[in-house]
Amino acid sequence: MKQYAEMKAKHPDAILLFRVGDFYETFSDDAIEASEILGITLTRRANGSAQYVELAGFPHHALDSYLPKLVRAGKRVAICEQLEDPKLTKKLVKRGITELVTPGVAMSDTVLRRSENNFLAAVHFGKGGLTGVAFLDISTGEFLAAEGNIDYVDKILANMAPKELLVQRGFKSRAAAEFSQPYLTFELEDWLFTLDAADERLRKQFGTSSLKGFGIDRMHTAVIAAGAILHYLDLTSHTRTAHISSISRIEEDRYVRLDRFTVRNLELIEPLDSDGKSLLGVIDRTVSPMGGRLLRRWLLFPLKDPKAINERLDVVEHFFRCP
């Protein structure tokens, strides 16, 4: 239990799955939460004299079944594995946290939804009402950034529907007050939300000397938000990020602004009636998850420029004509 407490202290806000033999065990408050979410039995065991601790666990081979349920319930999950064979040591088995899975940072097919991006977002509240926002889908490498007033950022957030939102420490309540929808919000240290730290981290990721080629070099609040996302990947030990090789700017003037009420009332993504069908449900005949995600985004971000619209239509027409 002392070893467990040491691991839990590293990520106190996460449910810790602690490997013990052929089982992943949870203890105390984690066990109570896990038993409710997963529907597994909650028991108690002795922990010293006149003291008990709650306990709930499941077989290690069932991780792919239970982990998605915890993540989709909005929980951060730290996985603590045995780092050596128990048969080869007479002492306490060495253990360590090998993965931290959060709703916004998931790569497993069992967690991800086929036709929906799993975006991690970050917001930086700048001076003069200017706000920066960035989105990353670590499973695909799609990295997007924008900046504008609160109303504009609120609309983008509503349409992109991030699974997790990062903000500077002390700004969680402001995010809840400013944005029209609730998000699973996590606070990061102040120094991560500085231009120097963000610029350096982004340039390191892309292997460039500046951000000018991405069109975001003067969008300081957006750069800070994007940098915070990459720092978060570092903090959560997600090191396989070579596929995140560029970042794109969401151009405000290029798209029609759709707020969440418009999206809902037009039934673009979800039907109003449980027996109904949305526009996406009617027209989605895509054959790959990437295609499904792209079509969803096209519906939520309609183009304004007739030339761009016709170019898109020409591409679609070409494939219809293919034998």
Image (tube, rainbow, N blue to C red):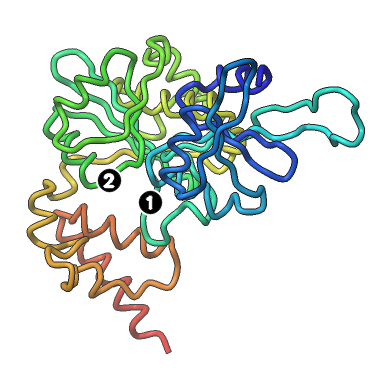
Residue 253 has which mark? none
Residue 117 has which mark? 1
Residue toward you, 33 or 307? 33
Q: Amino acid at mark 2?
A: Met
The residue carrying mark 2 is 160
Residue toward you, 20 or 53? 53
Residue 202 visible in the displayed image: no
Q: Quadrant for residue 121, please give it.
A: top left
Q: Are marks 1 and 2 in contact (CB under 8 Å)?
A: yes
Q: How far across and down, in percent of the image, does residue 271 sit? A: 16, 65
Task: Please give the count of numbered marks on the rendered protein.
Answer: 2
Element marked by disc 2:
helix
The residue depicted at 21 percent of the width and 61 percent of the height is: 269
| Quadrant for the C terminus in the image | bottom left
Q: How far across and down, in percent of the image, does residue 83 sit? A: 77, 32
Q: Residues within 10 Å of mark 2 (few under 14, many from 20)?
A: many
Judge left or right: residue 320 versus residue 200.
Answer: left
Judge left or right: residue 150 versus residue 51.
Answer: left
Q: Earlier along the polypeptide chain: callout 1 or callout 2?
A: 1
Position of 194 relative to 207 (above/below):
above
Element marked by disc 1:
loop
Q: Amino acid at mark 1?
A: Asn
